[in-house]
Amino acid sequence: SRRKFQALAISQLKEKTGKILCVSYEDGFSDVAELKD
């Protein structure tokens, strides 16, 4: 499914960047935002 693909892609992004990502599945990748500690 598309949601599963997005979750996997975001998981890989987290691994690469080491950053916490907040994802809005309704809007897809357009609302991926980095959260500051």
Image (tube, rainbow, N blue to C red):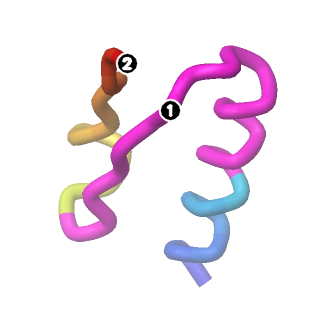
Circles 2 and 1 in contact, beta carbons < 8 Å:
yes
Question: Residue at the bottom extreme?
Answer: 1
Answer whether residue 22 is magenta in the image: yes
Task: Check if residue 18 falls in the magenta segment.
Answer: yes
Of the numbered discs 2 and 1, the one sitting upstream in the chain is 1
- Residue at 22% of width from left, 41% of height from top? 31
Instruction: Tell me the kind of residue under disc 2.
Output: Asp
Q: Would you call the spot at circle 2 few (<14 residues within 10 Å), some (14-19), or many (20 or more)?
A: few
Between 15 and 28, the one lying in front of the other is 15
The quarter of the displayed image where residue 25 is located: bottom left
* Residue in the image at 33% along x and 37% along y: 32
On the rendered image, what quadrant is the N terminus found in? bottom right
Side of 6 where 31 appears, left or right: left
Label 2's element?
Answer: loop
Q: Position of residue 7 (x, y in %)?
A: 60, 62
On residue 20, the disc is 1
Which residue is painted at 56% across and 59% down in the image? 6
Residue 18, quarter of picture: top right
Judged left or right of residue 35, residue 2 is right
* Amino acid type at mark 1: Ile
- Picture coordinates of residue 24, whole percent (x, y): 26, 58
Residue beneath disc 2: 37
Please report the bounds of the magenta region as a residue range. 9-26
